[in-house]
Amino acid sequence: MTLLIAGASHACTSTVELKSEIQYYIYPSVGTNYDDVKMAEYLKTHLQARTPNQILSKNYGPGVRSVEVAISDEFAGDYQVLYTSSGYKLSARTPRIMIWLCYQFIKHVGHMYDSSIAIDDLPPCIFPEKSYTGDLYFEYRDIDMPTNKTQDMTELLCLFNMENDWGLWGHQLGRVLGNPDDGYIQMDPENFAKIGGMTRKDQFCFSSDRLYDLAEQFIVDQYGDSPDYSVNITIGPNDNSLVCQCPRCVAAGNTPTSATPTVVAFVERLANRFPHHQFFIPGYSTTYDLPSHVLPDNVGVFLSAMDYPRVLGKSDSPEAKAFFDRLEQWKKYCKKVYIWDYICNFDDYLTPYPILLVMQERIQKYVEHGVKGLFLNGSGYFYSTLQETYTFILSELMIHPHLNVPKLVNDYFRDAMPHMGNFFAAVFNSLERRAADQGKPLPMYGGMDDALNTFLVEDNFRRYYDVLVNAETGEMTHREKVIYEKTKQTVSLSFMEICRYHGIGKLGFADFVDGKLEPNPEFLSALASLKEITEEEDLVILTGNESAAMDHMDRVNESGLYIADYENECALWIKERLWDDNLILNTPITLRRGDIRETTKMLTDAVVGISRNYHWGWQIIPQKNLVIEIPVDKARGAHNIQISFLNFVRHGMAPPNKIDIMVDGKLAGTLKRDISDEYLEDGEKVTFKGRFGMVPNNSLELVFDASNTPNVAIDEVFVTK
């Protein structure tokens, strides 16, 4: 386990070394049993890597703490800890479980008895204080976070990893068509959905014999045909609402919204062909509907928990009841129900997200309902604030769902951050309590307004941020300093978005000084913090992933916005100071759609929108029949208008086709985008500019020619001379 040996060596030199009189003798329960010998040597090697004291090669008598290691099924549970007269006996059903138990033992003795052992990089200890036999509630446990992206960390946390432990997972069926990076090589139209007489290459036809043949061959090529080797395989549609309506699919039972009949038939063919593999159907979107019959023993469901609100104490709500009713119905049709749950705000990886207490309650409910496996969908390869903390604690809760979460938080930060740990733990636990007390669902795709409405108390966050940015780092351990500096960097973005949320004023990004709008110093300081990029070698400490590249750690959200791009957009916005020339700065303007009228200052608050995040600086407005009324008294002398839009078609928003400038009821000009580049990426920001020559006397209006999306996202309206 190279990663943890290297981390341990560093940890020993970064703290005061306290020699211990304790000596350890580690030995296999059965000297002729390969697994016993292997795991006894494993524990010996990894304990030795964390202490300057020599691990004994034989028992020298009284005073030596002996540790017997056994891979066995001769007890009732999945693992067992026995306290003996001379030390311990550690038993586990499999070597994989034993690896986790070894590190729990190391953490236990390092915390309780032996201060020479480096334990600051290990999860909180849940090692029993007396003899204990334990069960693992879920046969499959997975957390999609950077910390769980190497086999070393996966095994240490007693988790699995879909990329290593599954054949196909999620929406990966397209892999059977060839390498998507090189362009799919199997582009036969028979493989794809037919809708309205058109072939849709973004969805599959599950009645296609050609698609089945490709899937069968893929499984044989990748995983063999031996009954001695088994993998989990998920087969499902692409992640959209399209359902094939070809004659064969419709005859099989497909509807315009449900592909369950053909997906089930497709999977059953594969399950019968490969009885040694375990197949799963996603219980999500177009395969949400139940099958019409009991499925083969090697077919289960991966049920999405998207519709189960992420809120504490509301498991009896109508939405929660509907989810668990569906879960119980699926259990009638298949032997294995796995849950796909969500532990991030996918529009903001960097603002702390207090999911622990909420997820603990959900895990307990899943155990009650006999769920066999649990996948927690997080930020994937991309760094999210304090993701190591969340991964460590959630992995423990998946083993022991009734643990004391605040204590786990305190225990983690006590070891990981000896100087600032109490402060971090207090903030962390206060966010958890706030989310619990509010009783509002945590946003899965939300902006700063959602965070402030559900768990962030702004005054508290500002105080927390002030302490964070002014902390002294001189006495911190190296590991602690890395965690501190990356946290300061990421929550600087959160602070900036709170300021941008307020716009102009003392709490905003800028305020008027002698009649001129100037950025607030705290905002500029936060912007500077975003440039403090964590050293690449320190990413190992934050993620446990030796191969982590910088771009994997610096995404802001699921849509692909980078921290560097956010910082660059904000820096350019501040440098350009376009607000200086805006005649309608901080002036209310009217949005009109038929008889509906709305007044807003959001389009004149000097806050520009950020690419790839429709929450940050954008006002989303239905664009059909949209007219923007500009105050005539403020627009005197104006001849230029500029507006930026967000192109996010998959979220139902795109720039209009054009905008007519109407002065006193007459056409005076047109706003259009620069069409020198015809291709427009999803998530891209687009600027429209136009000029008019007439001076308005009674009215200045912008009349929208709507595009084919229902909404338009606007950041600012600039009216200049």
Image (spheres, helix red, strand yellow):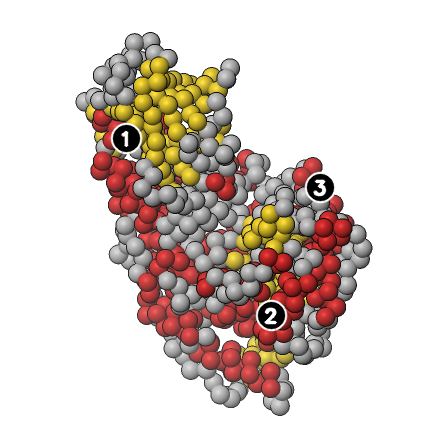
Percent from the top left, x then y, of residue 143? 54, 58
| Residue marked by disc 2 | 218
Ranked by sequence position, the earlier of labels 1 and 3 is 3
| Horizontal side, residue 518 vs residue 228: left or right | left
The quadrant in which the N terminus is found is: bottom left
**In which image quadrant can residue 441 be found?**
top right
Looking at numbered disc 1 in the image, what kind of residue is underneath it? Ala
Q: Is residue 296 above or below residue 573?
A: below
Q: Secondary structure at mark 2?
A: helix
Looking at numbered disc 2 in the image, what kind of residue is underneath it? Phe
Q: Is residue 585 above or below residue 26?
A: above
- Which is more toward the observer, 178 or 477? 178
Q: Secondary structure at mark 3?
A: helix
- Comparing marks 2 and 3, which lies closer to the viewer? 2
| Residue marked by disc 3 | 321
Percent from the top left, x then y, of residue 543? 42, 61
- Which is more toward the observer, 362 or 229? 229
Q: Is residue 467 above or below residue 72?
A: above
Looking at numbered disc 3 in the image, what kind of residue is underneath it? Lys
Q: Secondary structure at mark 1?
A: strand
The Cα–Cα distance between marks 1 and 3, rounded to whole angstroms, is: 47 Å
| Horizontal side, residue 402 vs residue 638: left or right | right
For this orientation, the residue located farthest to the front is 197
Which residue appears at 60% of the width and 70% of the height? 218
